[in-house]
């Protein structure tokens, strides 16, 4: 349908998207709270921000999916209210989620929505040809256009959604975290495509929280925080420092940075993992957790840190290796399943409240003490809930965590996100654990609540318990974590001491710019597994690495063994989808890389990051 | 939960006077109709209490609404229209229908029908205005309102509607439906459906008589039948759990297989295919016959059985670990798995209970009818579902409860008695039930718009 | 279904490593079952493969197939739309048609057809509007419709009876293969196949498979959903006409059975109840399979419990076929390019052989006395040989009359299929064409042999 729209040569600089004072509420949640933003023709414009800052909502508003509650939206002079309208206007969107129809063929999926109601815009034969060309051009490998999409690996599905958006030269292209399932080469091809489109006058909107990626590609960036735009950066100003400053707000980290990170009193171990691999075919490593420690886990998205904490908590099985927890009498018991983890007094708190945390229509009280019902029941087999005892427990945790609520019988959804999270953390504490594992719990919590949480966790650690805390915001670890472990490619890449923690160094480690010296130090309780020590490990892993489909992790191998990139398959749903596309190669093997483009990009990437700092 | 609005003294007095007036009016009519004194007094007190209670809420609505409407000035009328246009349109439609009926049917326009109309309108207004006060139990509230309205309209219009005998018979049938709906409620709380209930009812009905006819002691036969029902439920549970989201089709399939299987078993060696003969033991007849007695009291024990089951279930769902975990699974299965609730175990247990109670219903119906009939449960195919839905248990799982289903069962039963009373038979009831399910589900189980799912 | 619609053109480089598989193993099960049942049926009894046998089969099975089409059209649209009200809807059209006919208002064919399809379409339109705008789960809407229509059907026609419009009177005899009912079936099937060539069908499948993807890509999902339901309604109208022709009267209480059978047929035909997958081929096979099951079971002569056995079989098969869908991903992993057509053809050749064997070898055996099993004779049912029936001269003659016809019809189908295959697979490197050529040679060879053999038994029989 877009083919019928005549191409208008757009002078560069003309504003194609104008959004003013837009508000959008979902129930009590303010997704957008008076946000404004504009983008010009012929630029790559990034929308950046932390979790829940409203950037995805803004993308949905621009692509016509969500109607706004108030404010004005003008896109190419119109206000599309459905995706069909916005498509007719020449707006193409690639969504965060990989939206494909599994039961249909590749051709049908690529040309989805391009036909009129009854007649096709292209004959089926020409569609097939075009689809095959486009897919090979984009993904770099031939794809059967008649293949059922359900049989394809995730990376190719993502390409299908991108191919759909690129099918007709769009006037506005919106990419909402669209490179999540793509590997490095693919991302590079996508970027080349984007630059070519920009030069022809397309407005490209990218929504991402991958700072390195957007520093490289974008011409302008609008930063969002708490549903508002907080600043626009021109090309020259787009540096990580500026972005982080705007994203977090300057007063953000001051609250707790002076505190002293807790030190473990003894070398007594609380947990240990040996020869662990979080992904099938991933690198193996050892990990020790001492009593009294707060270990921060970080990394770019999809580098295995998420899988790691899940494995430790028994929520997800390890691909290889064994996790053990020390009992109070000093015996070790394995942690392979959730019941074993709970028996070993490990509590897990997920930051993904909606999906694996709260019970939406149940009360605050129930949400907190649900796991204790079994333990505190009366009447034997009859299983009556001992509300009295539990109410005491509830009151104590609620007071400890300063949860603000009306009546404890209110539904949990009546609380703000931060308070909901506190209830879940309270659920973890209520189980009287020895080890508490928190998976990005600070998502959508205000600063005050965070400080409170840190204080609480520190006290907990000082009692001789241990804390594992995953977060993608480095500032969270300041003055809080005993040590910080940074993940890359499914294994620890570097580790830092909590005292005198420099966020800059951690960030560099996340991007693979450090040497991994922290790993060598035994103090950090991290030893690279025997197999993971060198290239020999990759050789050993190769047979299992080649098969299957799914998210791709690029394992670098000597060319003699494998001329083509290797795809490895972690189990699909729980895992993050991809290695970081900007730099998937461990530094060790950088010298062996044959492709010049990577080196160029590393250099470019690295210099930009470095150059951006004072 | 919902705060009582503060209302002025005058308003309270006015409300009290109004309530007294209404109660007096009701009592007057009652005596005029020649009803028993106890009934009149009882209904008078009920009217009084209900009116005072309702008055507080109605006034509360206006008290709360006042500041906004008074400041807006001329826009207020329009705002009211916008806010209340659907109930107003509904009112207009009901009035129009009434006028039409009055004009076309001779003798329709009498005092009873007018009072019925007023009650109907009052229910409409009340459910609309007060329903908003209830976040969690709105459907129960609406159900009770409808129940009260239907009952009063029925009592006024139909001879003998509120007689002891009719109430007893309504409760009797409600008991069967209620016991049959136990399983459906439990399974719906998980987010599943069980359409094999009617077939298990039929199978148990025939199977029990068959076993008794073979000479098996009745108590043993009953146990065997109940156990078999639970066993079939286990199969249903396993299959439905394995084939997530297709519980409806799975249970329909197993239901047909069960019904066919039972008939084959009972037909082997019998000259009369599908017809089973035997003598129903007296105690079983007593349990569910209209003239049965419970510890000497003149009502069939099945009502007591239902009441006991209802109390146990309502309390159990609220106060036991199992009940709460059932809700937790229905609300969010991932969260539930994180607190180590075994999903499969609950699916199997709930379907097993469903099979058990279906078999129990089948046995009780045997006592009621005295003869085995495979199709005895057929009407329960959708009635159990309707009871669950009308009561307000969400079919998506995690919301509702057996208390709601009890209300749903009573509403359906009173409605069906009412329809019978005004001369509409089973087919009309089915038609009306069918039309009733849709708005009831639409009230509280609408799917989100696709925009919000991306 | 998803047969390779277009020849993969030359622009597609023929590389060995293409990503993705086309395999569609969902038809594996219905095709296998169909031929298995057909073989058993043919071996068990001689009467199926006669002009009247096939004619009766068509008359009985057509309403079922069309009811399955009704379900299929709306099920493809996704959201778990399994229209449980299909049975009562067909009943509703049936009883209203009978009553209107009795009132003398609906007698000639064109108004009848228009009326039936319009009623079906209007009902489905309301259904679609409720699903779209009230946003209640479709299954609830269909339950509601089921109850309401079942009730109102009994109100309209309290007990079975009445007369079908006169022009339908002879449709239901089922004495010849080419009855108007068959023409309706063929037209409906062809109409659907033509529809699958339109963009609308592509929209429909995409929406059914992933509604959010379709919505965000600009597919007008509201219109598409309404369209799917309208098509479904038209099929319902046709099903009702064929149903009326079958029973020649009105029957308000067929609802439950028809719904269950149609849902079973749909599942058996490999359609996905979640949406996005389904077609006339699978649906027709599913319905045929159910008919064949009944038919085969009837040859075992269970006496009085016949209908119970049928119920048991329906229920069990529904559950089993649902369970088998769990195996599909496993099959998909191993067979990357499964061609249902090729499979169908290979099996049909085998079964053709069995049919010919049954037809002609029995004929030469003559009227061998065979024992019919008594009612519920378990011994006979379990151990009884497959080939038991005896022939009387009348059926013999009938069969000999029909056999060449069936034979040539099958031959024509097979040849057409081969041409299609040969064209579509020519540019692909697969063994498909080779198999096609070999099987074609076998068929032609078999045909020649049969032709030789045909003349002699035929003359013998006549003598």
Image (cartoon, rainbow, N blue to C red):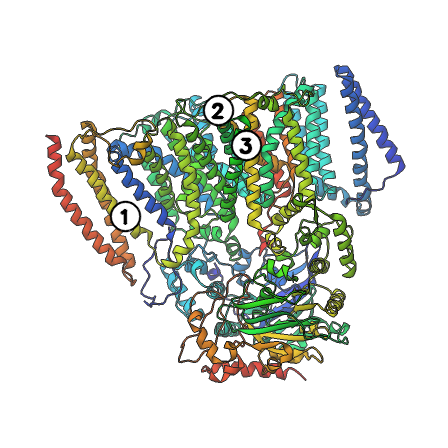
Q: In this view, does A97 lie to the left or right of A290?
A: left
Asked if badges 1 and 2 are on one and the same chain, I answer: no
Which chain's residue wears label 3? Answer: B
Task: Decide: few, some or many residues near mark 1? Use Cα within 10 Å; few <14, some 14-19, many ≥20.
Answer: some
Which sits in the foreground, A150 or A281?
A281
Which sits in the foreground, C356 or C120?
C356
Query: Nearer the N terminus, badge 2 or badge 3?
Result: 2
Residue on which the image places disc 2: B215
Residue on which the image places disc 1: C347
The residue shown at (66%, 28%) is B304
| C-alpha span from label 3 to label 1 | 50 Å
Q: Where is residue B88 drawn, in percent x and y? A: 70, 36
Q: Is residue C205 left or right of residue A236?
A: left
- The mark found on residue B223 in the picture is 3
Task: Decide: few, some or many residues near mark 2? Use Cα within 10 Å; few <14, some 14-19, many ≥20.
Answer: few
Residue A176 seen in the figure: yes
Please, what secondary structure does the residue beneath circle 2 have? loop
């Amino acid at each position: 349908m877009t083919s019928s729209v005549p191409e208008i040569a757009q002078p560069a600089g003309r504003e194609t998207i104008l959004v003013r004072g837009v508000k959008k509420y979902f129930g009590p949640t303010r997704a957008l709270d008076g946000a404004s933003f504009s983008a010009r023709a012929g630029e790559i414009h990034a929308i950046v921000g932390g979790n829940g800052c409203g950037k995805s909502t803004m993308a949905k508003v621009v692509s016509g999916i969500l109607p706004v509650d108030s404010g004005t939206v003008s896109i190419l002079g119109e206000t599309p209210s459905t995706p069909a309208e916005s498509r007719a206007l020449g707006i193409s969107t690639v969504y965060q989620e990989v939206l494909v129809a599994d039961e249909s063929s590749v051709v049908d999926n690529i040309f989805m929505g391009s036909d009129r109601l009854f007649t096709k815009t292209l004959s089926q034969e020409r569609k097939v040809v075009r689809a095959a060309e486009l897919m090979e051009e984009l993904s770099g490998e031939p794809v059967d256009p008649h293949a059922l999409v359900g049989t394809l690996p995730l990376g190719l599905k993502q390409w299908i959604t991108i191919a759909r958006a690129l099918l007709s030269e769009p006037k506005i292209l919106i990419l909402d975290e669209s490179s999540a399932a793509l590997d490095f080469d693919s991302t590079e091809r996508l970027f080349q495509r984007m630059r070519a489109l920009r030069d022809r006058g397309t407005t490209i909107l990218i929504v991402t929280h991958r700072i390195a990626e957007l520093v490289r590609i974008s011409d302008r960036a609008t930063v969002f925080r708490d549903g508002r735009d907080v600043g626009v950066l021109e090309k020259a100003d787009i540096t990580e420092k500026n972005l982080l400053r705007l994203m977090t707000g300057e007063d953000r980290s001051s609250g707790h940075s002076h505190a002293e990170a807790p030190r473990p009193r003894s070398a007594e171990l609380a947990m240990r993992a040996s020869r662990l691999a979080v992904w099938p075919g991933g690198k193996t490593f050892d990990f020790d957790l001492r009593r009294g420690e707060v270990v921060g886990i970080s990394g770019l998205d999809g580098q295995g840190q998420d899988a790691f904490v899940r494995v430790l908590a028994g929520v997800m099985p390890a691909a290889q290796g064994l996790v053990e927890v020390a009992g109070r009498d000093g015996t070790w018991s394995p942690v392979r399943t959730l019941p074993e983890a709970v028996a070993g007094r490990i509590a897990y708190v997920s930051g993904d409240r909606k999906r694996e945390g709260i019970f939406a229509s149940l009360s605050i009280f129930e949400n907190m003490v649900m796991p204790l019902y079994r333990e505190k029941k009366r009447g034997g087999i009859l299983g009556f809930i001992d509300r009295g005892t539990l109410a005491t427990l509830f009151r104590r945790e609620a007071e400890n965590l300063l949860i603000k609520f009306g009546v404890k019988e209110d539904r949990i959804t009546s609380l703000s996100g931060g308070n909901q999270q506190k209830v879940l953390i309270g659920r973890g504490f209520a189980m009287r654990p020895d080890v508490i594992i928190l998976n990005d719990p600070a998502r959508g919590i205000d600063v005050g609540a965070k400080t409170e949480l840190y204080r609480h966790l520190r006290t907990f650690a000082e009692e001789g318990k241990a804390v594992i805390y995953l977060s993608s915001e480095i500032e969270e670890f300041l003055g809080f974590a005993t040590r910080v472990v940074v993940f890359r490619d499914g294994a620890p890449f570097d580790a830092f001491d909590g005292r005198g923690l420099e966020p800059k160094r951690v960030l560099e480690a996340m991007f693979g710019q450090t040497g991994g010296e922290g790993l060598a130090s035994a103090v950090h309780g991290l030893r690279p597994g025997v197999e993971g020590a060198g290239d020999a490990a990759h050789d050993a892993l190769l047979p299992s690495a080649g098969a299957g489909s799914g998210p791709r992790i690029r394992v670098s191998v000597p060319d003699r063994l494998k001329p083509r990139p290797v795809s490895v398959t972690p189990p699909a749903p729980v895992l993050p989808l991809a290695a970081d596309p900007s730099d998937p190669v461990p530094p060790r093997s950088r010298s062996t890389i044959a492709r010049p483009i990577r080196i160029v990009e590393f250099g470019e990437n690295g210099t930009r990051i470095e150059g951006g700092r004072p | 939960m919902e705060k009582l609005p503060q209302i002025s003294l005058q308003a309270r007095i006015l409300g009290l006077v109004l309530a007294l007036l209404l109660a007096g009016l009701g009592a007057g009519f009652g005596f005029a109709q020649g009803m028993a004194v106890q009934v009149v007094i009882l209904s008078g007190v009920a009217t009084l209490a209900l009116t005072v209670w309702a008055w507080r809420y109605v006034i509360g609505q206006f008290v709360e609404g006042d500041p906004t409407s008074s400041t807006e000035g001329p826009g207020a009328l329009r705002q009211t229209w916008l806010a209340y246009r659907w109930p107003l349109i509904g009112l207009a439609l009901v009035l129009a229908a009434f006028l039409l009926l009055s004009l076309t049917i001779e003798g329709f326009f009498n005092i009873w029908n007018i009072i019925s109309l007023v009650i109907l309108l009052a229910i409409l207004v009340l459910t609309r205005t007060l329903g908003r006060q209830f976040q969690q139990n709105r459907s129960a509230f609406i159900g009770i309102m409808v129940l009260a309205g239907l009952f009063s309209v029925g009592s006024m219009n139909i001879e003998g509607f509120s007689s002891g005998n009719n109430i007893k018979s309504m409760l009797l049938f409600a008991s069967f439906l209620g016991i049959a709906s136990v399983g459906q409620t439990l399974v719906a709380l998980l987010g599943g459906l069980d359409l094999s209930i009617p077939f298990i009812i039929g199978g148990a009905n025939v199977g029990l008589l068959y076993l008794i006819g073979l000479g098996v002691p009745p108590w043993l036969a009953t146990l065997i039948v109940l156990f078999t029902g639970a066993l079939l439920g286990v199969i249903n549970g396993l299959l439905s759990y394995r084939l997530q989201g297709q519980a409806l089709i799975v249970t329909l399939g197993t239901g047909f297989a069960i019904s066919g299987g039972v008939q084959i078993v009972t037909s082997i060696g019998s000259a009369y295919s599908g017809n089973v003969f035997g003598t129903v033991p007296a105690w079983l007849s007593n349990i569910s016959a209209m003239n049965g007695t419970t510890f000497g009291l003149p009502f069939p024990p099945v009502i007591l059985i239902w009441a006991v089951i209802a109390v146990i279930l309502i309390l159990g769902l609220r106060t036991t670990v199992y009940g709460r975990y059932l809700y937790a699974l229905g609300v969010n299965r991932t969260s539930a798995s994180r607190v180590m609730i075994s999903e499969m175990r609950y699916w199997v247990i709930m379907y097993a209970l469903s099979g058990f109670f279906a078999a129990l219903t089948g046995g009780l119906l045997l006592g009621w009818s005295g003869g085995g009939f495979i199709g005895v449960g057929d009407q329960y195919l959708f009635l159990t579902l309707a009871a669950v839905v009308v009561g307000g248990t969400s079919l998506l799982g995690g919301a509702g409860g057996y208390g709601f289903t009890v209300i749903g069962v009573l509403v359906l039963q009173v409605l069906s008695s009412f329809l019978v009373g005004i001369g509409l038979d089973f087919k009309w009831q089915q038609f009306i039930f069918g039309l009733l399910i849709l708005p009831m589900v639409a009230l509280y189980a609408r799917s989100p718009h696709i925009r919000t799912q991306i | 279904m998803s047969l390779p619609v277009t020849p993969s053109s030359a622009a597609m480089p023929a590389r060995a490593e293409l990503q993705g598989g086309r395999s569609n193993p969902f038809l594996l099960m219905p095709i296998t079952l169909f031929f298995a049942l057909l073989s058993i049926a043919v071996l068990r009894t001689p009467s199926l493969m006669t002009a009247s046998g096939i004619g009766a089969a068509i008359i009985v099975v057509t309403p079922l197939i069309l009811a399955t089409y009704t379900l299929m059209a709306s099920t493809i649209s996704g959201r778990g739309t399994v229209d449980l009200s299909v049975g009562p809807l067909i009943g509703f059209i049936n009883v209203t048609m009978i009553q209107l006919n009795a009132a003398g208002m609906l007698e000639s064919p064109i108004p009848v057809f228009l009326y039936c399809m319009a009623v079906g379409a209007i009902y489905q339109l309301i259904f679609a509007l409720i699903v779209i705008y009230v946003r209640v789960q479709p299954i609830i809407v269909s339950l509601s419709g089921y109850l309401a229509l079942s009730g109102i059907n009994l109100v309209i026609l309290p007990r079975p009876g009445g007369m079908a419009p006169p022009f339908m009177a002879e449709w239901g005899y089922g004495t010849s293969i080419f009855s108007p009912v068959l023409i309706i079936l063929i037209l409906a099937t062809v109409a659907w196949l033509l529809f699958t060539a339109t963009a609308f069908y592509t929209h429909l499948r995409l929406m059914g498979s992933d509604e959010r993807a379709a919505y965000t890509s600009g597919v007008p999902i509201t219109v598409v959903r309404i369209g799917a339901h309208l098509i479904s309604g038209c099929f319902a109208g046709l099903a009702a006409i064929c149903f009326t022709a079958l029973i020649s009267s009105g029957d308000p209480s067929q609802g439950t059975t028809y719904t269950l059978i149609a849902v079973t047929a749909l599942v058996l035909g490999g359609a996905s109840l979640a949406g996005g997958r389904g077609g006339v081929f699978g649906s027709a096979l599913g319905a045929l399979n159910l008919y064949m099951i009944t038919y085969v079971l009837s040859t075992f002569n269970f006496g009085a419990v016949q209908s119970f056995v049928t119920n048991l079989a329906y229920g069990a098969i529904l559950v089993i076929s649902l369970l088998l869908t769990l195996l599909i991903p496993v099959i998909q992993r191993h067979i990357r390019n499964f061609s249902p057509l090729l499979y169908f053809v290979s099996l049909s050749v085998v079964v053709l052989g069995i049919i010919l064997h049954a037809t002609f070898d029995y004929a030469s055996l003559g009227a061998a006395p065979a024992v019919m099993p008594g009612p519920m004779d378990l011994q006979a049912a379990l151990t009884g040989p497959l080939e038991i029936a005896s022939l009387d001269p009348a059926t013999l003659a009938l069969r000999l009359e029909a056999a060449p016809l069936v034979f040539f019809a099958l031959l024509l189908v097979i040849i057409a299929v081969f041409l299609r295959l040969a064209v579509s697979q020519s540019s692909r490197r697969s063994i498909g064409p080779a198999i096609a050529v070999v099987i074609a040679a076998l068929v032609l060879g078999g045909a020649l042999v049969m032709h030789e053999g045909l003349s002699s038994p035929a003359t013998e029989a006549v003598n």
